[in-house]
Amino acid sequence: MTRQHVRQNESSDCGAACLAAVSAAHGKTVSVTQLRDALGTAARGVSVRGLVEGAVELGFEAKVVRVGEDALTTSYTRPAIAHVTTSTGDPHFVVIHRATSRRLLIGDPAEKRRRWVAVDDFLERFTGVLVLLAPSRAFEPGGSQSRPVGRFLRLLRPHRALFLWAILGSLILTVLGIATSFATKIIVDEVIPYGLESLIVPLGVLFLGMYVVQHAVQFIRQWIVLHLSQRIDVPLILGYFAHVYRMPFRFFDSRPVGDILTRFGDAMTVKNVLTGAALSAVLDAVMAIVTGAVLFSLDASLFLVIVVFVIVSVVLVVAFLRPFRAVNGEQMQQASVLNSRIIEGLRGVEGIKLEGFEPREMEGVEREYIRSVRFSFREGMLENGQSTLMSLFQAAAGLLLLLFGTTRIIDGDLTLGTLMAFVALSAFFIDPVSRLIGLQLEWQEASMALRRVGEILDYEPEGGESSGFAEIDHGGGVRFDSVSFGYRGRATALRELSFSIREGERVAFVGPSGGGKSTIAKLLLRVVEPDEGSIALSGIPLERISPADVRSHIAYVPQQVSLYSRSVADNVRLSVPDASPRAVRRALERSHADEFVAALPHGVSTVLDEAGAGLSGGERRRLGLARALLKESPLYVFDEVTSDLDASTEALVIDDLMASLPGATVIMIAHRLASVMRCERIFVVEAGRIVEEGTHSELIEMGGLYADMWAVQRGESQSTRGRVEEARSSRRPRGRQENDAITYR
């Protein structure tokens, strides 16, 4: 059994990193990114239930236990995952690898490596919760680490010709550099001693021409490098974003925007290394090899001095490898945390200002920024120390070369011209070798960037190719058969849900908050997949239809309508980009958005602020409704589409919706029952189950939950609020179980 320490990418990854470490200890390699979804990791972390469910999915038998001080060092399955608190009081996961009577070998994913901790010190942080893990029969050792370097090197293959031209240019520059360096030797050893004045002008013209050619080749080579950079830039950077847009919804649910943007910066770092450092490494290597051979042929003894300098430099680089790797990883992780904190604050700036929360929010940003500055300072000090030592050794090598060469001249073993040529040529060897050695700084940063970008590119995208469904004229029938679903690490949201909706039928789902109504829409749109049961759209199993085709078939208005910094018209025709201006105006009229749009400075041509800032909730809803109506789909799903509208506008919108969608299937999800009265069937959803079904009148006559909710909303009976609140509370767990105790980070 091997033991391995796995670092977390961010604070919410501690559970995934710990499980990855335990899995590696049992011989199975799995990345932290892959485990995030299996554990149900959210931005705030993972729950014990999510950790256990993810471990079982990975092939482990998992058990949560509470242990006292005495049992912590006794015999139990290790490695085990323990819950602790950090120095700031935040919950956290660590791995216990080994135990003695006095010490524990702890793998903290927030730290660089495992370390031994005194039991008494560990008990100060330990909460008493242990997750014991052992491989089950379903456990399959194996797996392999991603090879991000190969992926990115493949980007160079289509441009091998450019790469070879750049190398050829480097060879020409090297030859010209060597040739011009011999100018000094010829003048000192031949022209001056023998008084060959007639050669001065021809030699001057010759070497001047060589200098001109040298700089021309250098210009062309740099143009090739820039062109190569541009060719790689587009597929790498745009390919990263294209891949991100193909990610399933759970990818975005579990990652802060700041982390995704920071990894975009990592992709830029990779691009710079591919087009700059990688090419320079090849060119410098060619130059060093050719020049080294010439220097060795000039004087092997002097060349030995340079070789000693190179060996010392390599030793110096190796000594700094681990510190640079550690600080680069911490710096990238902290940059992600800082970006996420700033983005979160800017998005919620209205609430921050209204609550007078600015000072505390600024304290949080300041705390994260100061941590970033500290990491930058540590990296700068490492670079400063390494470059200072490197410069010192280089100066010492130059001095030693001069002194040793002078001694050989005095002894008659070397001419002055040869020494001067050797010193001039040595720059063509030492400089590229120094650059090659210095590339370790860029490579350290690039290797971390490669890993972080590779984790995103290794993530399996959502199936985006057409399944052929959209090419056939299908209706809007929907069927759920015994569908159960639960968000990982949380209680089940839907339990054996079954219902059928006929094509062209108007239905509604109502019920207490948290009952699972919006989850039904997410399942239908393939935002999430059912744990059990089946879903059919127009009689075709949903899993046989690609998510892209499902969403093109359904016009959906979510609770939170997304708007963009584009014109009103462009926001409305988002999914129908070729829609005519007349069709856009008609959609705005049908959604009753035409009046407030006409009042905007430029009407439908008005460019909205970022994310639709400046519009009211009702205005945003109506633009979202206009977008859906423009799509003219056979199936419409409206999630709280009238919740921000006043009663009179709501009535107008509902009446027009029912009248203007002939033949289409309409599914309404609502809290306000007045908006669903005209539906042909109403499903009452409570605690993930359909508890009542019927028309508005039939449900009122039943005198059940729907009737009580109707009475509350109509203000007819305040005493019925207790029944509704009881229905809402029934969605919550009856007692706190061990696996649901808390979310750990």
Image (spheres, rainbow, N blue to C red):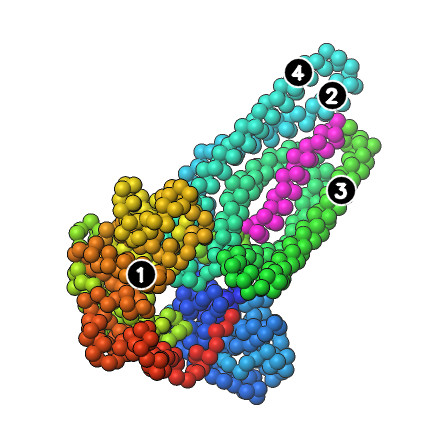
Instruction: Tell me the kind of residue under disc 1.
Output: Ser
Residue at disc 4, secondary structure? helix
x, y percent for residue 220: 54, 28
- Residue 140 occupies which quadrant of the picture? bottom left
Instruction: Tell me the kind of residue under disc 4.
Output: Val
x, y percent for residue 287: 60, 35
Residue 322 position (above or below residue 514): above
Q: Mark 1 points at which residue?
A: 648
Instruction: Tell me the kind of residue under disc 3.
Output: Ala
Label 4 vs 3, first from the N-terminus: 4
Give the spatial CA distance, label 2 vs label 4: 14 Å
Q: Does the magenta stretch include residue 183?
A: no
Label 2 vs 4, first from the N-terminus: 2
Q: Nearer the viewer, residue 625 or 395?
A: 625
The answer to whether residue 406 is seen in the rendering is yes
Q: Which of marks 3 and 2 is in front?
A: 3
Q: Does the magenta stretch include residue 426?
A: yes
The span shown in magenta is 417-446
Q: Which of marks 1 and 3 is in front?
A: 1
Q: Name the residue under label 2.
A: 187
Residue at disc 3, secondary structure? helix
Label 3 vs 2, first from the N-terminus: 2
x, y percent for residue 94: 54, 73
Left or right: 516 as drawn, with respect to 212:
left
Give the spatial CA distance, label 3 vs label 2: 27 Å
| Mark 3 residue crowding within 10 angstroms, few (<14) / some (14–19) / many (20+) | few
Cβ–Cβ below 8 Å for labels 1 and 3?
A: no
Q: Nearer the viewer, residue 93 or 568?
A: 568
The mark found on residue 395 in the picture is 3
- Residue 486 occupies which quadrant of the picture? bottom left
Label 4 vs 1, first from the N-terminus: 4
Cβ–Cβ below 8 Å for labels 4 and 1?
A: no
